[in-house]
Image: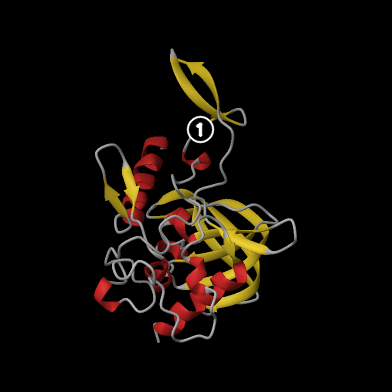
Amino acid sequence: MRKLKYFFLAVLLSVMFSTQMLTSKAHHAVLQFNLEEMVATADKVFVGKCTSIKETEEMIAQGIMPVTYYTFTVSEKIKGDIPQTFTFKQLGHQPRKFNKTIKNNEIVPMVGGKIADPDTFIVHGMSYYRVGDEMMLMLIPNYMADLTYPVGLYQGAFHVTRTSTGKPIVKNSINNRGLFTNAYNNYSKSTDKAKVIHPEGDLEVPVIASRTSNQNFAALIGKPGALPLTDFTGLVRTIVESEK
């Protein structure tokens, strides 16, 4: 039964990531998105605070799989039809600290006194959230069994924190790397259809903000790391409008 469970998990993961993964010699590397292609790929974009987490198992792809339901109170809707209280489902459970034990002369990973198996599995690169976390999320359209996840896995999950003066700032787990400089990978957008982000054009003006009066966008591209939340959401809204 456990072998069957692992098999179905492997099948689901291959379906889930086949279009957003690139093969490298050492490992699977996640497709790198720039901000405009990320927004174009996303079905829903919002800012909100995580209020509850529910881990469970469901029948998916003819096997029982671990899934986690996240509920957010939405403070800003940017793209898509999103209710004020929004719940979505991701594959896998929250990460846990692993211990090890010896069984049949083999080292076996343990979680909470139990042998680690797909029930304790969280997808490599998948974002997860804690109650109280404030996030800006860009979620792909629902796929198998209404699952979803952020565009480019960790790339589309931006943590909102505050400076010592209380100013909200936002960054993903790779410090916003490549948001304005990654080339289009033709997943949802191509260079010839770019309207806002132009990484291959004039390096001094890769962001075109002609559809808005916000003058802070040009300054965003020169700031490594966390970006001001208000300016960032304004730029994302500009991209959303450019798609219409």
Q: By what rule are the colours in the image chosen?
A: secondary structure
- The single residue placed furthest to the top in the displayed view is 105
94 up-or-down from 199: above or below: above
Instruction: Identify whether 176 is placed above or below 118.
Output: below
Q: Residue furthest right?
A: 165
Residue placed most toward the observer, 174 or 113 = 174
Closest to the observer: 45 or 63? 45
Q: Position of residue 171 (x, y in %)?
A: 55, 57
Q: Quadrant of the C terminus?
A: bottom left
Check the image and report above or below for 88 versus 83. above
Q: Residue at x 45, y 73 (%)?
A: 43
**Figure quadrant of the N terminus:** top left
- Residue 181, how many percent across, how many down? 37, 61
Q: Decide if residue 19 is on the left or right side of residue 158.
A: left
Please give the name of the residue rendered at 57% of the width and 65% of the height, measured from the top-left corner: 136
Type of amino acid at the residue the image marks with label 1: Ala
Give the mark count.
1
Residue 41 in the image: x percent, y percent? 38, 70
Q: Position of residue 195 (x, y in %)?
A: 35, 79
Quadrant of res 111: top right
- Identify the secondary structure beneath mark 1: loop
For residue 82, say whether it is visible.
no
Are there few (<14), some (14-19), or many (20+) residues within 10 Å of tag 1?
some
Inspect this view and state whether residue 153 appears: yes
What residue would you read off at disc 1?
A: 116
